Image (cartoon, rainbow, N blue to C red):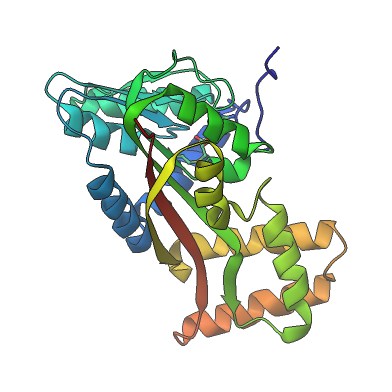
Amino acid sequence: MTTPRPTSAFHAANTDPAVTERLTAALDVQAANAGVRRLRAWAHDRLAARPGERALDVGSGTGSETRVLAAAVAPGGTATGLEPNAGLRAVAERRAAEAGSPARFLDGDALALPLPDADADVVWCERVLQHLTDPARAVAEIARVLRPGGRVALLDTDWATFVLHPAAPEIRPALAAVTQATAATPDAGRRLAGWLADAGLAVDELGSDVLLHDPRTVSEPIVRGLGAAALRRGLLTEEQCDRLYADLEAAAGRGAFHLSVTMFAVIAHRPR
Ligand SMILES: C[S@@+](CC[C@H](N)C(=O)[O-])C[C@H]1O[C@@H](n2cnc3c(N)ncnc32)[C@H](O)[C@@H]1O
């Protein structure tokens, strides 16, 4: 018996339109990030999806990478985005239609992929594993659906690399603790290669990029979210939080703000 969905602490079951709008905006900001763009380009280049192939994008969000895969496998191929969140799936379907992309989207769970064994030529799975409590099982599922010789790209963040400056030394442990608590598996980035190897796949290449965040776009919600979480957990006082926000705002005003996190990508294939 497979575990019923949702399996992630993320937003799989949340279909409130306001939440869909917020998540879509957050994914769009990330998609515009220079580090994300570089690492995605690197991973697509190494994955090298070809015309006629069957591609699967696990946890496809707004479908941006499913559309990239659909273009790569045309003509003759198929690109399917698997997305359990109905709101995001609808966004992905609308955007694909608007772009004239043949990418298609299905409901489904990374822990029980709705594909037969050895059905996919290429699989893409980006920033999904960090939200799962059993990511190794999802990677085993990816290995199951890959045909012998098929390729996979896993991309994920490692939240231990989160750097926020300026933050007073005495509050840094609290910030690190709440940052790690925002994902079910916050160290996913460093574990990608191991999960792939454990699933019987051959690791070919590792890549990484640093995501630097602009204070005018993502930083405000990220920092406020972390502050609120630290308050709820009693890790910071209101005074410490207010001081943090004020210090960061002042630093942003004079160009001294820094917020970064490292994202990793691993390319692997199923041995023949
Ligand atoms: C941070 S978003 C990443 C979306 C997209 N891959 C990207 O990089 O833009 C995480 C995605 O994983 C999806 N997700 C969460 N739990 C999942 C599960 N158990 N199976 C498949 N996808 C899941 C979410 O709905 C969401 O679309």
What residue is rendered at 59% in x and 26% in y?
Answer: 111
Place of residue 215 in the rendered image (x, y in percent of width and height, measured from the top left): 47, 70
Q: Position of residue 188 (x, y in %)?
A: 58, 51
Q: Residue at x 71, y 69 (%)?
A: 175
Q: Is residue 72 left or right of residue 189?
A: left
Foreground of the two, 189 or 213: 189
Most extreme residue toward the front is 272
Quadrant, the C terminus: top left
User: Observer-nearest residue: 201 or 45?
Assistant: 201
The percent position of residue 138, horizontal first and vertical second, equals 56, 32
User: Can you tell which quarter of the image residue 39 is in?
Assistant: bottom left
Q: Is residue 158 above or below residue 121?
A: below
Residue 236: quadrant of the picture = bottom right
| 26, above or below 62, in the image | below
Please identify the residue farthest to the right as the structure is shown: 234
Please name whichever residue, 30 or 186, is drawn nearer the observer in this view of the structure: 186
Task: Say which residue appears at 31% left-offset and 55% top-offset.
Answer: 37
Q: Is residue 11 something that shows in the picture?
A: no
Residue at point 18%, 34% (across, down)? 72
Work out which quarter of the rendered image holds the N terminus and state it: top right
